Amino acid sequence: MKISALISDVDGTLVTHDKVVTPRTREAVAALQARGIGFAAISGRPPRGMLMLVEPLALTGPIASFNGGLITRPDLTPIEEHALAPETARQANALLRGWGLDVWVFAGQEWFLTAPDGSRVAGEIKTVLYQPLAVTDFDGALENAFKIVGVSDDPEFLARCETEVRAALGDAASASRSQAFYLDITHPAANKGHGVQRLAALMGVPMSEIAVIGDSYNDIDMFAQSSLSIAMGNAPADVKRHAHFATSSNDEDGFAQAIHDYILDA
């Protein structure tokens, strides 16, 4: 199998639990580039949260944020944008609030919330490396929202919410859990299946020569698009079963191991 590019998820894949890009990960990406194999990242993160990857991984190509809702150059200059329709954003916000979930809205380059002391806020700040803006309502932000997140400490309840959101919003949005505690609602074209296709096109690589690697439920869509899909060892079992192969966990340099086992040394 010819692999001309690898497209990777970020959290739970490229970085450790503590959000670190390890030396082995840097070396593995450099080895891909030295072999002439392209590399790109796709994530539910906002664009500003992707900047921490640019220098250590020497990224020069397109970067997909918001699960493909906003594709930028490494300096965050937009290439493609897919924001939610305002009416869909308002409906999504009402659904999530009706279930008692904390709600985050990512609009433009900003992160808005109404509960700054929420249980997951500190962890997300550590991830994206910038502060949210506390507001009393989301009225303005919902006019240009790239991603709305429902946050819960109850993963089983959030899984049920995902099913109900999909039924309620239908083709007007894409809904998937980027982590066990986060339900992401984005534009219907802002899912990792479509995002991988757009990254491949921008990189000039046919989908038949694309490999992908990820760890969570929103990565299943890109697994389905690729000829070579790899799940991280820390992925849930029902995510792993959609991938061709599984590697070690993100805290055991599973990303670097996968590059050598399934691409460079295959």
Image (cartoon, grey):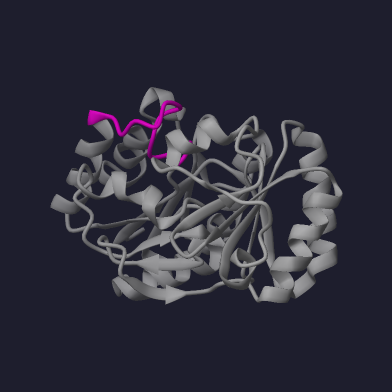
Read off the magenta span: 11-23
Residue visible at 47% across and 65% down in the picture: 108
Q: Quadrant of the C terminus?
A: top left
The answer to which quarter of the image holds residue 198 is bottom left
Q: Residue furthest front?
A: 136
Residue 92 in the image: above or below residue 170: above
Q: Residue furthest top?
A: 252
Residue 146 in the image: above or below residue 49: below
Residue toward you, 181 or 48: 48
The answer to which quarter of the image holds residue 101 is top right
Q: Position of residue 118 (x, y in %)?
A: 65, 34
Residue toward you, 103 or 33: 103
Q: Position of residue 15 (x, y in %)?
A: 38, 35
Q: Could you tell me what secondary structure mostly forms the magenta stretch?
A: loop
Answer yes or no: is residue 175 visible.
Answer: yes
Q: Is residue 234 magenta?
A: no
Residue toward you, 163 or 98: 98
Residue visible at 61% across and 51% down in the picture: 135
Q: Position of residue 57 (x, y in %)?
A: 23, 46
